[in-house]
Image (cartoon, grey):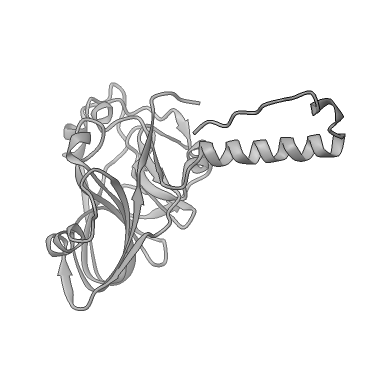
Amino acid sequence: MKMKIKMNKYFKYITLKNSISLLLFILLFLSCAQYPRDLVYQESTIGQLDDGEMEGLLSMGELKKHGDFGLGTFDGLDGEMVGVDGEFFQVDYTGKANSVNDKIKTPFAMVTFFESDKSITLTGDYNYQLLKDTIDQALPSKDLIYAIKITGEYQFVKTRSVPKQQKPYPSLKEAVKQQKIFDFKDIKGTAVGFWVPKFMKNINVPGYHFHFITEDKKAGGHMLEFKILNPTVHIDFNTDLHLSLFYD
């Protein structure tokens, strides 16, 4: 989107007050154009993380400018990132969720400003596969990126986290071998995740990818399996992707 500003011979007669108003309008317009709401911002690629590029170079303060919802990891693969309702948490190797400050850095993250375009309220028990199959039916296209939030009464959740890696960093596959598994039973919480098209397989994880945080924001991790009763699913349709390979 581009906005053209045309100045004519009457421009010199604009008052200082009007000039300030015009400037504020232009800044507001450019701000909206720079950060469209149906946009996913991604820092780095899953391919780079797979290859062991785990040094955090983008600060959380900068990342938060691009979204209030998302997932990722931290410097040296130090835990799982969960972002929901504008709050970001780090689930460490013990499974404990901690608030993150703006100075902590990430090597890989995916965020958006979450605005639900479609909500589904379901009745009954759903495991991970059944719920994914159900959500599939609600996606209007296989060429978009969807941010997905799932809330409800989780009868069972299995998550993981990985210890911080040391240089020289291993591949992601090797690092995950050190994962620690956490089991939760009869707990309320939120699954935070995305559905990504298959053609993005070298950029991000194709299909579904979820991280989990408990309702009290004290624990969570990368979601492996779950069973949920009467889930509510909120889906945010995203038409644009901003892939950043630069760092602050």
Name the spot of residue 63 as percent of width and height, x first. 47, 39
Residue 90 seen anywhere in this rendered image of the structure: no
**Which corner quadrant of the image does residue 200 belong to?**
top left
Q: Which residue lies furthest to the front in this view?
A: 9
Residue 167 seen anywhere in this rendered image of the structure: yes
Pick the front one: 206 or 31: 31
> Where 40 sits versus 235, above or below?
above
Pick the front one: 9 or 128: 9
Give the residue at x 35% y 30%.
Answer: 44
> Where 46 sits versus 119, above or below?
above
Name the spot of residue 162 as percent of width and height, x first. 26, 43
> Where 127 sits versus 208, above or below?
below
**Which corner quadrant of the image does residue 202 belong to?**
top left
Name the spot of residue 166 as percent of width and height, x first. 31, 28
Name the spot of residue 135 as percent of width and height, x first. 21, 60
Give the residue at x 33% y 63%.
Answer: 118
Name the side, left or right, on which 107 lies relative to 66: left
Pick the front one: 75 or 195: 195
